[in-house]
Image (cartoon, helix red, strand yellow):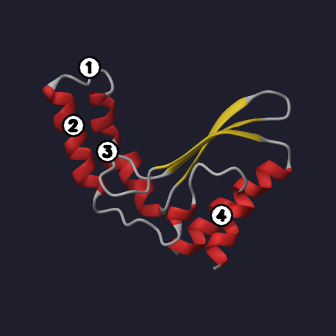
């Protein structure tokens, strides 16, 4: 499932590029020690509309949307110097440590072209 998720992500990125969508941000947080595991992208449509697209595995989506979201909502209103902010972050990191990083996901980085990462996955 993990390699397929990576391939589907890259195929989606490549398809959007081919349709004239310009990627402005790509952030891969499928890494150990992260409070959030997923791939966040921001695109600009050919007409100039900006939108965000997130890529998740079923497990990372469940963690983000159900388990960690209430903690995030508490944390986001606090200054990052507040001890409660730090405690909430540490709890989210601990929770997210149970989410496996999909095989092949490390090839999805701040990449210029999606097909470059597809070649990495094939090798």
Residue at the (70%, 50%) spot, across then down: 112
Q: Nearer the viewer, mark 1 or mark 4?
A: 4
The Cα atoms of the two marked residues, 3 and 4, are separated by 30 Å
> How many angstroms separate mark 3 from mark 1 (CA)?
18 Å
Judged from the image, the secondary structure of the residue bearing numbered disc 2 is helix
> Looking at the picture, how far across and down is residue 109, in whole percent?
56, 54
In the displayed structure, would residue 25 be above or below residue 112? above
Disc 3 marks which residue? Answer: 68
Q: Residues within 10 Å of mark 2 (few under 14, many from 20)?
A: many
Q: Are marks 3 and 2 in contact (CB under 8 Å)?
A: no
Q: CA distance from mark 1 to mark 4?
A: 37 Å
Of pointers 3 and 4, the one earlier in the residue sequence: 3
* 65 or 85, nearer to the observer: 85
On screen, residue 70 above or below 7:
above
Question: Residue 47's spot in the image, x, y percent?
Answer: 85, 29
| Eye-nearest disc, 2 or 1 | 1
Q: Which mark is residue 6?
A: none
Q: Gap in Å between the C-alphas at discs 2 and 4?
A: 34 Å
Disc 4 marks which residue?
Answer: 117
Task: Name the residue beneath numbered marker 1.
Answer: 79
| Distance from Cα at disc 2 to Cα at disc 1 | 12 Å
Q: Quadrant of residue 8?
A: bottom right
Q: Please name which of the two marks, 2 or 4, marks the residue nearer to the observer.
A: 4
- What's the mark number on residue 88? 2
* Residue projecting furthest to the left: 83
Distance of mark 3 from mark 2, alpha carbons? 9 Å
Q: Secondary structure at mark 1?
A: loop
First in sequence: mark 2 or mark 4?
Answer: 2
User: Is disc 4 surrounded by few (<14), some (14 to 19) or many (20+) residues within 10 Å?
Assistant: many
């Amino acid at each position: 499932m993990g390699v397929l998720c990576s391939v589907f992500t890259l195929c989606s990125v490549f398809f959007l590029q081919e349709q004239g969508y310009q990627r402005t941000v790509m952030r891969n947080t499928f890494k150990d020690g992260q409070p959030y595991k997923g791939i966040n992208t921001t695109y600009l449509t050919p007409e100039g509309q900006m939108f965000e697209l997130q890529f998740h595995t079923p497990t990372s989506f469940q963690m983000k949307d159900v388990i960690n979201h209430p903690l995030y909502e508490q944390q986001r209103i606090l200054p990052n110097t507040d001890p409660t902010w730090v405690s909430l972050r540490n709890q989210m990191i601990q929770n997210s440590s149970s989410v496996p990083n999909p095989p092949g996901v490390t090839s999805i980085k701040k990449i210029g072209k999606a097909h470059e990462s597809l070649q990495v996955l094939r090798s």
